[in-house]
């Protein structure tokens, strides 16, 4: 049997150095803006962590239209990262531009509801099969609220998450498994006792889940139906979700699915597609076309509990810590209404699924042709790459075959060929307005890189 090719590390570095140099040299206007930006922003970017996310000159954007954006040096990119899925609808879709412009002209925020709030809630209820909805400005905030409500409902404090998760930037979710298996804060600025409120178990490990839930101190399990962060796409084993639901019910634990990324797989995300039965669903990002918006839905029973949080005299009392001045504002609602009713149509999902199939098939063909021992995961509009011959089932398997340097080479190689790739740990996603040409541009550049790496 022929042995699979082994890629020489020195070759990866040689190609990456050359591609990095080309990228920088070709973009003097981005470079000049970045130099200027250091005067007013740490790392010269609006969020200091952005810099670490790219490891190269940050691109400064001029405009975006459809599935492409153009940088200030005039280079256009077919976008397969789509702002970490928040722009799944593409740039400047006409219905969202219209809805947002009209709403802005008629007043965008009142701290009072507009009829759009009802239309959006009805549509979310239809899609996710949970009857009652509440709003924030981001998925992180939606998840924060879900956890707080879960605590009130169960009178327990802890939240259980799966190793390798990302659910946003709030304390309970910024905890990870350290090397010795103990929980540690993921970043600086978190209190030392932050680990006390979180439990982390490996995805797809029903034994560990049963043991953790058996302690009956977990308010809520929060999970993506399929994991989409940090290690690409990690699918649940057959029967995983059924058993998760059984165990949560048996131990008095609530269950929340975070559909922030997985909503791109279909209307109602994987919750609807797989017939899951959570107590909560949360979403954000593309559900309002990238206009700041977060939503969480729940059952009548839990919602009823929220509506009872009022004293006999009608004054507020014992409220759950929810809400913010701009949450549920009229502009976000108008964007969400237009997104769901006019952009994320059944046809749009079909289209991205067909193109996702084309993307994954093209990527697989290159892997097979070059004999690299890599696996190409695929679901709906999303593909990816695993530097091992088989899919990974959890974060530990993901870590074992991760190769950040190689991913960074893939990104810069594609960028120099007009394709914008995922941040490390994600994977390419086909946005709604993408065409076969966009997908073929990705596959062609990918194929050329694999050839270069193996010849
Ligand atoms: C599954 C999931 N949930 C929540 C979030 C947080 O989203 P935001 O940063 O918009 O609050 C993310 C962001 O990547 C995510 O992937």
Image (tube, rainbow, N blue to C red):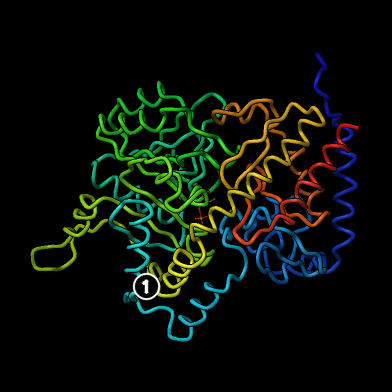
Question: Which image quadrant for residue 419?
Answer: bottom right
Task: Name the side, left or right, on which 317 lies relative to 176.
Answer: left
Task: Name the side, left or right, on which 201 lies relative to 360.
Answer: left
| Number of marks | 1
Q: Residue furthest top?
A: 1
Considering only vertical position in the picture, is 313 above or below 275? below
- Tell me which residue sits at (76%, 30%) in the image: 368
Task: Name the side, left or right, on which 164 lies relative to 309.
Answer: right
Considering only vertical position in the picture, is 432 above or below 18? below
Q: Residue furthest bottom?
A: 105
Q: Identify the element where label 1 is drawn.
A: helix
Find residue 114 and report its horizontal and vertical position in percent. Answer: 34, 76
For disc 1, the neighbor class at 10 Å (few under 14, some 14 to 19, many from 20) is many
Task: Name the side, left or right, on which 376 lies relative to 221.
Answer: right
Considering only vertical position in the picture, is 279 above or below 331? above
- Tell me which residue sits at (56%, 31%) in the image: 395
Find residue 363 and report its horizontal and vertical position in percent. Answer: 73, 40
Query: In which quadrant is the N terminus drawn?
Result: top right
Which residue lies under the disc numbered 1?
116
- Tell me which residue sits at (79%, 44%) in the image: 446
Find residue 29 and report its horizontal and vertical position in percent. Answer: 83, 69
């Amino acid at each position: 049997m022929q042995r699979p090719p082994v890629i020489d590390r020195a070759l990866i570095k040689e190609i990456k150095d050359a591609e990095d140099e080309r990228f920088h040299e070709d973009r003097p206007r981005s470079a000049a803006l970045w130099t200027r930006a250091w005067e007013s922003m740490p790392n010269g970017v609006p969020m200091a962590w952005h810099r670490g996310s790219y490891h190269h000159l940050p691109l400064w954007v001029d405009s975006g239209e459809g599935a492409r954006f153009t940088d200030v040096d005039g280079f256009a990119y077919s976008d397969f990262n789509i702002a970490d899925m928040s722009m799944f609808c593409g740039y400047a879709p006409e219905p969202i531009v219209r809805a947002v412009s009209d709403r802005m002209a008629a007043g965008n925020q009142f701290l009072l509801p507009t009829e759009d709030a009802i239309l959006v809630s009805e549509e979310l209820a239809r899609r996710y099969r949970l009857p009652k909805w509440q709003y924030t400005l981001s998925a992180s905030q939606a998840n924060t609220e879900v956890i707080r409500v879960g605590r009130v409902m169960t009178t327990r404090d802890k939240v259980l998450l799966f190793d390798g998760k990302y659910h946003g930037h709030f304390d309970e979710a910024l905890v990870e498994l350290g090397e010795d298996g103990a929980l540690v804060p993921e970043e600086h600025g978190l209190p030392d006792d932050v680990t006390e409120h979180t439990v982390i178990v490996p995805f797809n490990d029903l034994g560990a889940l049963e043991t953790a839930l058996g302690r009956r101190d977990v308010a809520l399990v929060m999970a993506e139906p399929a994991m989409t962060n940090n290690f690409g796409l990690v699918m649940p084993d057959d029967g995983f979700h059924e058993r998760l639901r059984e165990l949560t019910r048996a131990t008095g634990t609530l269950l929340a699915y975070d559909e922030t990324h997985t909503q791109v797989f279909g209307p109602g995300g994987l919750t609807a597609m797989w017939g899951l039965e959570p107590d909560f669903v949360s979403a954000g990002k593309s559900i309002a076309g990238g206009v700041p918006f977060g939503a969480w839905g729940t059952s009548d029973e839990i919602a009823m509990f929220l509506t009872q949080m009022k004293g006999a005299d009608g004054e507020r009392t014992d409220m759950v810590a929810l809400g913010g001045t701009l949450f549920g504002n009229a502009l976000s609602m108008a964007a969400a209404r237009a997104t769901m009713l006019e952009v994320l149509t059944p046809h749009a999902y079909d289209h991205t699924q067909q193109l996702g199939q084309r993307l994954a098939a093209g990527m697989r063909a290159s892997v097979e042709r070059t004999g690299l021992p890599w696996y190409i995961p695929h679901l709906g509009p999303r593909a990816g790459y695993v530097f091992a011959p088989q899919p990974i089932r959890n974060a530990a398997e993901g870590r074992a075959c991760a190769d950040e340097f190689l991913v960074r080479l893939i990104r810069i190689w594609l960028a120099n060929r007009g394709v914008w790739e995922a941040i490390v740990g994600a994977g390419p996603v086909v946005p709604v307005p993408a065409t076969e040409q966009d997908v073929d541009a990705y596959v062609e550049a990918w194929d050329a890189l694999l050839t270069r790496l193996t010849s």
